[in-house]
Amino acid sequence: MRRGTFRDDTVDYAAVGATQAPDLMQYPPERSVPAEQSWRIGSGQTRFEAAGESLLSWSALRGTGLQLTDVRPAAGPMYAGVSFDDEGNAITPSRMEADQRFDADGTPYVGAGTTVKVHGRVDGMRADAELRVIFAVEEPRRVGFALGTVGDSVVSGEESFMLDWHANDEVWFTVRAFDAPVSLAYRMFPGLIRRRRRTLFTGYLRAISPLYTTPA
């Protein structure tokens, strides 16, 4: 079991960890647009483990067409505990050392405190940003992490990516997010935030699920 939580005031929003709040969709952080979607992506241990490896090697972000650069793991010891239980209550973390893993290209896997820069466009609009992994979790039946904006982004907020292998053998992929507009275009036209989020969700699903098909 590997768990990690990273708390740092260098992110550019206050509600750190709010993607784990049960009532996110009803009570999002101030000025933020919430989003949530879940997909059944198969069943069984093999599907869960393959999806987990894909997720922790940044495949979801790459699936949107974004490029990753300057992936920097956190220096020093990690923290154990996701900081939130199933009801969204805070859990006090404890220190731990975690082995660093790398993908075939030498890019470090997702880890709590890792900072990454992304570059590209979503729906024709700039999507460059610096992001930080707020927490990461690897458990026998749950794998995932959350990313928070550090700066240089058109929106400010957080998104979490979670894989769950349920008792009925189904594997589900869930993405939750909240975005507050930063750029002038997104402040003037809030609908662009929802459109951007739909495009991102589609890219994430395409990258993680072998069952994905483009809707007719």
Image (cartoon, rainbow, N blue to C red):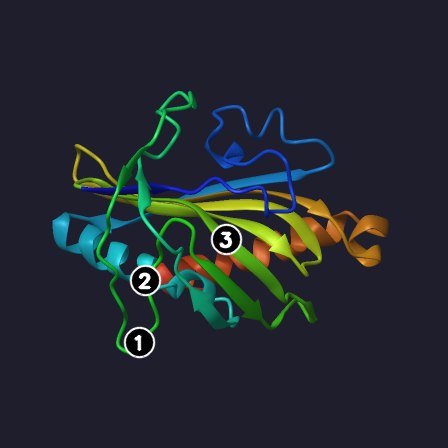
Query: Which element is circle 2 on?
Result: loop
Q: Amino acid at mark 1?
A: Gly
Mark carried by residue 109: 2
Quadrant of res 104: bottom left
- What is the crowding at mark 2: few (fewer than 14 residues within 10 Å), some, or many (at least 20)? many
How far from the left and from the top, in percent, is residue 148?
A: 54, 48
Q: Which one is nearer the viewer's eye here, 62 or 100?
A: 100
Which residue shows up at 69% across the image and 52% down it?
Answer: 155
Is residue 87 depicted above or below 193 in this figure? above
Image height check: is 31 above or below 64?
above
User: Callout 1 environment at 10 Å: few (<14), some (14 to 19), or many (20+)?
Assistant: few
Nearest to the observer: residue 24 or residue 106: 106
Which residue is denoted by mark 3 in the rendering?
Answer: 132
Amino acid type for the residue under numbered disc 3: Arg
Query: Does residue 178 appear to the left or right of 106 in the view shown?
Result: right
Indicate which disc, 2 or 3, sits on the residue closer to the N terminus: 2
First reached walking from the N terminus: tag 1 or tag 3: 1
Q: Which residue is mark 1?
A: 106
- What's the distance in space between the residues labelled 2 and 3, CA to CA? 13 Å
